[in-house]
Amino acid sequence: MRRATVAAVAVALVLVLVKVGAWLVTDSVSLLSSLIDSLLDVGASFINLLAVHHALQPADYEHRFGHGKAEHLAGLGQAAFVAGSAVFLLIEAAYRLAHPRAIEHGEVGIFVMLFAIVTTIALVHYQRYVVRKTGSVAIDADSLHYTGDVLINASVILALILGANIGWGFVDPLFGVAIALYLLRTAGKIAFLSLDPLMDHELPEEDRERIREIVRAHPEAGDLHDLRTRKSGNTIFIQFHLELDDKITLRHAHKVADEVEKKLAASFPAAEILIHEDPEGVVEYRPYYPPPRGAPGKWLRILLGLPREWG
């Protein structure tokens, strides 16, 4: 995980240097937008580096559940970086629409953008590999942002071609506006995906159903209730009440719970599991959790491209 964050910072720094030179030569707003995006990449990736380093620290006396939420806080920081740069870009693009300028040496900008696309694609592939291995939320958010950069760089190439070769100077600031709006959408998506774990959102329903199936598959397990799940960094927390025959001894109940816990740990390797044994048939207070209202968040989820289980 640390190598992925270091690689992201290094790539962002290289792209900033080459884009500064290209922007000074071409004076293109769309290229400026890509430069601003790379500048915030440096800041966001550096925050990720610090967050991942902190999140990987083991639990201590004052943080018994570990430091995993540092990754989600980094995601909120990334969203703030992206949103701020988008607002700045909108202001610059509006000014350029009112005071248009000709694009010069467009071929330099095109070459730099091609270099940026190849470099960013390589970084995204590496980040995706790390996410599959670790499930890191911070690196996943960083990868989402860099994936957007590939599209941004491709649109800059198109704007440079139209502006420098065809003379459609108005296209350059218009592409800047489109990129800014895309950045705002990306910022919203990163922010909401980071808020879910910070608010202890339940795991997706398919994971919760898999937990129920594993528990009920044990021959001595009656059922379970009050299942609660959440995720912090790379760690999943699972807790529930396990219903057992009231005639077995406490030692045997403990043995059954241990066996269920081992089965769950095999399917959820990064999980901390807490099981409370209950005798079957005992009536106890069970809090009522009303089903989520999907309608209010439906259009926001579609707009931001959030996963179906969000909200």
Image (spheres, grey):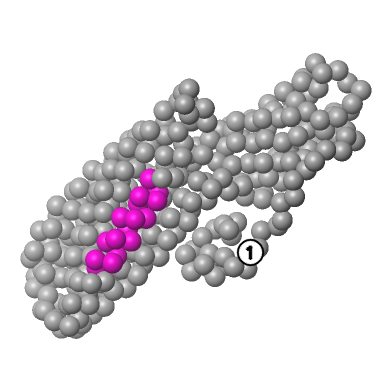
Asked if 201 appears above or below 153 in the picture, the reply is above
Q: Is residue 132 magenta?
A: no
Q: Amino acid at mark 1?
A: Gly
Residue 205 appears in the rendering = yes
- Neighbour class for label 1 at 10 Å: few (<14), some, many (≥20)? few
Asked if 18 appears above or below 294 in the picture, the reply is above
Q: Quadrant of residue 282?
A: top right
The residue wearing badge 1 is: 294
What x and y, as percent, mark residue 71?
A: 42, 41
Left or right of 247? Residue 66 is: left
Viewer-side residue, 126 vs 249: 249
Q: Which residues are magenta?
A: 74-89
Image point (35%, 60%), residue name: 148
Q: Quadrant of the C terminus?
A: bottom right
Image point (81%, 22%), residue name: 253
Q: Is residue 79 magenta?
A: yes
Asked if 213 appears above or below 56 in the picture, the reply is below
Q: Quadrant of the N terminus?
A: top left
Image point (80%, 16%), residue name: 251
